[in-house]
Amino acid sequence: MSAFTAAEPAVAATHNVSLYRAIWRWHFFAGLLVIPFMLNLAITGSLYLFKDQIADTFYSHRYLVAETGTMLQPQQITDAALAAFPGTRATSYHEASAPNRSAWVTVSKDGQSTIVYVNPYDGSILGSVGSKQEFGWVVKRIHSLEYFGTWTNRLIEVVAGFALVLVVTGIYLWWPRQQSGGVLTVRGNPSRRVFWRDLHAVTGAFAGILIFFLAFSGMPWSGYWGANVNAWLTANNLGTPAAVWDEVPKSTKVTQDIVSRAGWVVENAPVPLSDIAAAQSARPIGLNKAVHIMHGLGMVAGSDLAIPSDPTGVYTASHYFGDLGEERTVHIDQYSGKPLVDISYDQYPALGKAIEWGINLHQGQEWGLFNQLLMLATCLAIIVCCVTAATMWWKRRPSGRLGVPPMPPQKSVYIGLWLIAIIFGVAFPLTGAAIVAMLLLDRFVVRFVPPLRRFFS
């Protein structure tokens, strides 16, 4: 056997070790950075999955009523809310979704909105809450960190991208290499580091696909990637069919400006104008008639109805939460009662449908309780992965050092990592930028600054 032939397995082994160490090191850095944010996503996500059940339990006085006869007309319900909050203007009406449910009226004054819960049978006020203090709203904004500002929302977008990286690199690290322990079973006991390592690996392997799905399907809400993808889809008629707006005059407003709950793909769709000529002479049809028209169009019980804010505004009926087959947005001329734009999930282009389906599944709304429990199990798996990762790091860290996995002996493996960074940079710019920064720090700063090299060893 020649020296060259004998060297080939050694070179291959060195390359495999280098690749493993590089990916392990990257997995470690990414995981350590995102643990607190992933915990927040998992905990708030679990709460949001069951927001309706939580609301009915802790705020039943707002949502549940006794069925006592015939419901009042929508305008009477709205007038009751306005009487309780003098000087405000009604911006939307949410009809009772069932005989034992309350109606909601959103009123606004000086840019501040309040949701008023009204008994639809006698007009009594059941309670109120600022629209930005409502349980579901607060949990969702903490989930995305939008509650704390724009830059934190961008940060959570980076975290979601890192979650994709963690799943892919984690599967690589878990992949069986002629061993059985720690692949499908957990070895040892909680006092040993191997127990936490195996629990982390096995949990991540079993839940990896679902964790990847949650991270990816959550991206549409992100402030940078999601907003730009939505705008691109809208501009290229891939989110909603532009033809439905061809025959109507359009305002400068988009759907999310006037509707608090709308499908993601229609959020940036333009809002049409009511007949401008009729605005000079005709009388508006009024809320009662608008609700009657909404019912006549087949909108399901519990739909929202945005109320026009000016003479050229429209009534906008929308149904978002629940069965995608019932997701629908209808803009109604406030003078003629004519539906100007009527768009439902079935009309979305294929890409718009796919994104909306992913969002619905992400929120636990597609398959009822099973969907909620499946996503809850995924959130719990994320919590387990975070806790086990922190625990095994704590158990292996050297005194006074971070305990980063050793650098790969072959630096050429970084070429592959740079390629991955470029791919992520194209697909998810903020995450790609963070990966590039991490690689630059690891490759060109840590190596040549002795105190950092010691701390990161």
Image (cartoon, grey):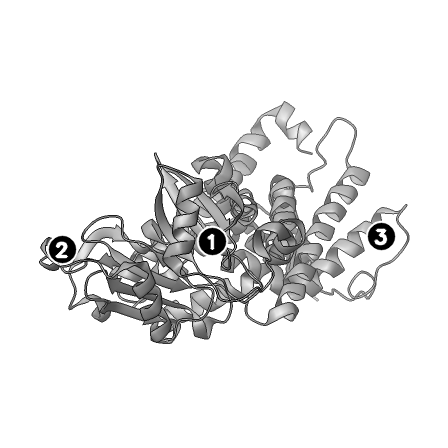
Q: Earlier in the sequence, mark 2 or mark 1?
A: 1
* Res. 25 in view: no
Amino acid type, callout 1 = Trp
- Residue 273 bears which disc, if any? none
Question: Residue 176 at what x, y percent from top left?
Answer: 74, 65
Q: Quadrant of the C terminus?
A: top right
- Element type at marker 3? helix
Mark 1: few/some/many CA within 10 Å (<14, 14-19, 20+): many
Where residue 138 sits, quadrant-wise, is top right
Q: Which residue is tagged 3?
A: 195
C-alpha span from label 2 to label 1: 28 Å
Amino acid type, callout 3 = Phe
Q: Earlier in the sequence, mark 3 or mark 2?
A: 3
Question: Residue 21 at what x, y percent from top left?
Answer: 66, 49
Q: Which residue is tagged 1?
A: 104
Q: Residue drawn at (43%, 37%), measured in percent from left and top? A: 150
Q: Residue drawn at (13%, 55%), measured in percent from left and top? A: 279
Q: Is residue 115 above or below residue 373?
A: above
Q: Quadrant of the N terminus?
A: bottom right
- Residue 279 bears which disc, if any? 2
Question: Residue 432 at what x, y percent from top left?
Answer: 45, 47
- Element type at marker 1? strand
* Res. 443 in view: yes
Q: Residue drawn at (14%, 60%), measured in percent from left and top? A: 275
Mark 3: few/some/many CA within 10 Å (<14, 14-19, 20+): some
